[in-house]
Image (cartoon, rainbow, N blue to C red):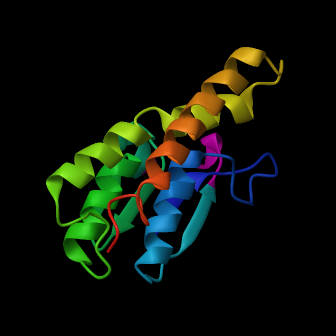
Amino acid sequence: TLYLKAAADKKSVGDCPFAHFVRLVLEEKGLDYDLKPTPPDGKPEWLLEHYEGKMPALRHRKECYVESGVIANYLDYFFQDPPLKPKSSKEEQEAEQVLEGFFPAVAKFLKDIQDTDETLHALQLKLQELDNHLAERTFMCGDD
């Protein structure tokens, strides 16, 4: 079960890019999961007590994992096909460097209600960096 931020209606999926990332990992791996959009006032007691109410939170069997990167690593370790990480650690490091700050830049831009040039410029820089990286290879981490 994936607990994630609910939208304003408290029923549909909210705008958290970290939760969207986890959903992409689950979909890429072809894993079935229950989706629980959860408003702040509807978080389960166990999530508040043991995990500071952090979301996204993946509850699998009797374990729970929070933080999108931790969840992705957990899923990749226990459900290895298809792998999320490349065979080469150099390729992985290069991809991680390009993605560093990408999701926060997207989130800041999407949440910028004042429509400032600063958030747009920061996102454009990250997108250009990503575009340059992908121009040199077929996939984020190489060509296979």
Q: Is residue 15 above or below residue 11?
A: above
Q: Is residue 39 magenta?
A: yes
Residue 117 on image: x %, y %: 76, 17
Q: Is residue 44 among what the camera can see? A: no
Of residues 113 and 97, the one drawn nearer to the viewer in this rendering: 97
Residue 88, quarter of picture? bottom left
Residue at 69 percent across and 15 percent down: it is 118
Residue at 30 percent across and 68 percent down: it is 75
Q: Is residue 84 among what the camera can see? A: yes
Of residues 17 and 64, the one drawn nearer to the viewer in this rendering: 17
All told, the count of numbered labels is: 0
Q: Is residue 143 above or below residue 70?
A: below
Residue 47 on image: x %, y %: 41, 48
Residue 96 on image: x %, y %: 33, 44
Residue 20 on image: x %, y %: 57, 56
Q: Is residue 72 magenta?
A: no
Q: Is residue 32 above or below residue 99?
A: below
Query: Would residue 34 be found to the left or right of residue 92 on screen?
Result: right
Residue that lies at the very extreme toward the front in this rendered image: 136
Query: Would residue 65 be found to the left or right of residue 13 on screen?
Result: left
State which quarter of the image contains the C terminus. bottom left
Of residues 126 and 132, the one drawn nearer to the viewer in this rendering: 132
Residue at 58 percent across and 47 percent down: it is 17
Q: Which residues are magenta?
A: 38-45
Residue 81, quarter of picture? bottom left
